[in-house]
Image (cartoon, rainbow, N blue to C red):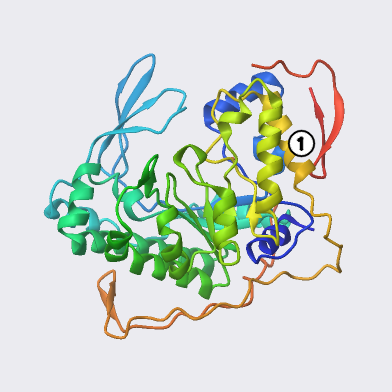
Amino acid sequence: MTSRERILRALNHQIPDRVPIQDSPWTATVRRWHKEGLPEDLSPAEYFGYEMVGFGADLTPRFPVEVLEKTEEYIVTTTPQGGKRRNHLDYSTTPEIIDWPVKSKEDWKEIKNRLKPDFTRVDWASGLQRNAQARKEGKFTFFSAACGYDALQSYLKSEQLLMAMADDPGWVKEMVMTLAELAVVTAELMISNGFVFDGGWIYNDMGYRNGLLFSPDTYMKTHYDADRLLYGYFHSKGMKTLLHSCGNVTQLVPVLIEAGLDCLQPLEVKAGMDLVTLKEKYGDRLAFMGGIDVRLMADPDPGKIEEEIKTKFQVAKKNGGYIYHSDHSVPKNVSFQQYCHVMELVKKYGVYEEYKEEPSVEVKPAAAKPVEATPARKFSLFGKKTKPVTIEKSSSPAPEPQTPKPGPASQPAPARKSFSLFGRKGEKK
């Protein structure tokens, strides 16, 4: 079974041979692992067999990026969005935004004028090659874009944005829709010119440790129509819909399902996201990715992470609908040896004993209901007014490319040892 088939079965709530795997180690984590046994010429994705490959585009206003200050610990730069940010030199944390380009509606107008679809937003040369290679290897490929509240935090200060959502939701909705429309037009441009995608993965952090950053009612006023546009478009192309949203977004799950979401990630444990409860309540309508507590990966007692994976897999993998991922991203306090142990546990407890190998057939996304447009509503797509339309979901996957081309503290093991992890043979050094 290829990665693509395995993930599509999981997203369609069908039984695969095993739980699919995907993860997101920090750059600083990867640097540590290269010193502890991860071969220098391999990424974690290659070494551990991650099964999804993403492709995006530059959806920013494309202001020039310049280094303003650099110390032994931090670097301060301008941003493509027109702001300023501070980051650790090893990029081991989320960057701190220290200035924002939008302080008034007039500022937004200038930004919006720069958010036009453009052929040059896409890295065609390497992107098409990587896409074709990923398809050849049987990976699940997806289009990715940051949208909504999460993306707007690069333009407006968080306090200003939250106040605007309460006092002027119409303006916020217009900004959110602008970003969504740019993502849709860019995805269409990429698909029409050779990219092949199985899914659309949107990044929009809408929660924090104690709950939502804004109410479900505010989401409906500012985000719902944009998400319906995005998910409806992806479904019309036979693509699955995935959402990365950090923090506790449990209250939003019902409306996200209504908007057309197929899979929610990453299910932060420390924020109160409970994979087992979510699976039991919404598992027939929504797939889940993540929910494995990264804090336990670094615990000196390996039994804790084993119990975490064993217990949660027992519930999450039932009837399909689950993909392994850490509950956020893997920090640099997790050693290479500890993470190897995590992958071994995922392999051990992720097997579906009830799976019986079947003849190789194309796994098609389940047929979906059409997305109903609001009859009285018209929206503007980059200045062009259009009539409300109904976007039908396709039951057929996107076609394969015609001409694939070949192509992101423990001590290391003391001796070479052959091993096989998810079917990939290699050597530990």
Residue 358 visible somewhere in the drawing: yes
Residue 188 visible somewhere in the drawing: no
Residue 241 x, y percent position in the rendering: 52, 63
Query: Considering only vertical position in the picture, is 145 above or below 189?
Result: above
Residue 196 x, y percent position in the rendering: 60, 64
In what quadrant of the picture does the C terminus appear? top right
Query: Residue at the location (49% across, 81% down)?
Result: 370
Residue 186 x, y percent position in the rendering: 43, 63
For label 1, count other residues whose C-alpha is less than 10 Å away and answer few (under 14), some (14-19) or many (20+): some
Query: Residue at the location (49% across, 64% down)?
Result: 261
Q: In the rendered view, does 96 fall on the left or right side of 241?
A: left
In what quadrant of the picture does the N terminus appear? bottom right
Hey, which quadrant is residue 33 in on the image?
Answer: top right
Location of mark 1 (residue) = 344
In the image, 150 versus 218, the foreground residue is 218
Residue 77 x, y percent position in the rendering: 31, 30
Query: Residue at the location (47% across, 43% down)?
Result: 272
In the image, 212 versus 426, the foreground residue is 212
Query: Considering only vertical position in the picture, is 197 above or below 341?
Result: below
Q: In the rendered view, does 209 fall on the left or right side of 383?
A: right
In the image, 369 versus 378, the foreground residue is 369
